[in-house]
Image (spheres, rainbow, N blue to C red):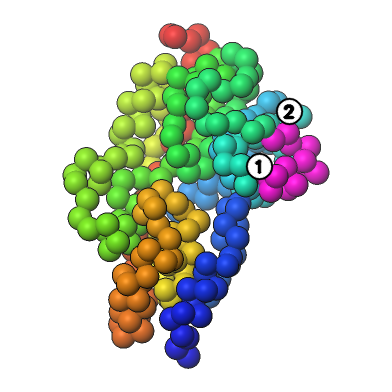
Amino acid sequence: MSRDFQDLLDEAAAEPTEGWDFSWFEGRATEQRPSWGYQRLMGERMARATAALDIQTGGGEVLAGVPTHPPLTVATEGWPPNVPAATRLLHPRGVAVVADPDEPPLPFADAAFDLVVCRHPVTVWWDEIARVLAPGGTYLAQHVGPSSVFELVEYFLGPQPPETRGARHPEHDRAGAEAAGLEVVDLRSERLRMEFHDVGAVAYFLRKVVWMVPGFTVHSHRDRLRELHEQIEERGPFVAHSSRHLIEARRPERSRR
């Protein structure tokens, strides 16, 4: 049954955005998951590690879903609303949460961790990752790839230049890791179908993932949202494609740094 445009926007505007729990989208939006199963791979590495760091943990949801954590596990988070959410979720699991601005340097000593993980970092500071990894240590991450959800981005912002569309290419990450002295042992990428079934799901997504359409608000983009609402009502879900890549890199036992 069709729902009123204003009701959908009001609901999306009222929903809190802290953390990375996306359960609100159930029945309203869908996204395919990468075939490699990042959380499963992360859990396998965690079970073998002695000291692990999760960078930019968000609300801690991914780390909390890992069955076994190393004796020493630390998570960092830079967005203030996420820090208490991550603390509430992770502290009972023995994980320390450190408020960190996500800028160099990381607040840890050299070679402090044998495992560093990260899901969807905003920025990757390769030199810092290499510095805090112990010799033989591993960085395992799932990164956002190039032109991710750009069907939606360009709906609001218009066509983007090639350098913007090509940013976050997995080969850029390979080059950054190798320049920091790490050896890339796995690099895979996939594009994954997304569907938004109502305009409220779009509005909430853009409120939550704030870097997609900088400056987005329900009020300032109301006209374009109404056009999108009418399009979805007439043609069905708005289809976009996310871009993800898995990267695993190791610090050599004898570092070249």
Residue 137, given in percent of the width and then of the height, sits at: 56, 22
Would you call the spot at circle 2 few (<14 residues within 10 Å), some (14-19), or many (20 or more)?
some
Which residue is rendered at x = 52% and y = 42% of the image? Answer: 119
Residue 35 appears in view = no
Which residue is rendered at x = 59% and y = 13% of the image? Answer: 110
Q: Which residues are magenta?
A: 84-97
Which residue is rendered at x = 55% and y = 73% of the image? Answer: 11
Residue contact between numbered discs 1 and 2, judged by CB atoms under 8 Å: no
Q: Give residue 184's quadrant in the image.
A: top left
**Relative vertical location of residue 233 with respect to residue 88 in this rendering, above or below:** below
What residue does disc 2 label? 72
Near-viewer residue (95 or 249) = 95
**Relative vertical location of residue 177 with respect to residue 93 in this rendering, above or below:** above
Distance from Cα at disc 1 to Cα at disc 2: 19 Å
Residue 90, given in percent of the width and then of the height, sits at: 73, 43
Which residue is rendered at x = 30% and y = 76% of the image? Answer: 227
Residue 62 sits inside the magenta stretch: no
**Relative vertical location of residue 227 with respect to residue 253 in this rendering, above or below:** below
Foreground: disc 1 or disc 2: 1
Query: Which type of secondary structure does the marked residue at label 1 adopt?
Result: helix
Q: Hey, which residue is sitting farthest bottom in the picture?
A: 1
Res 127 label: none
Q: Is residue 238 left or right of residue 64?
A: left
Label 1 is placed on what type of residue?
A: Val
Query: Which type of secondary structure does the marked residue at label 2 adopt?
Result: strand
Q: Give residue 240's quadrant in the image.
A: bottom left
Q: Is residue 63 left or right of residue 228?
A: right
Q: How many marks?
A: 2
Marked residue nearer the N-terminal end (1 or 2): 2
Label 2 is placed on what type of residue?
A: Leu
Residue 206, given in percent of the width and then of the height, sits at: 43, 59
What residue does disc 1 label? 83
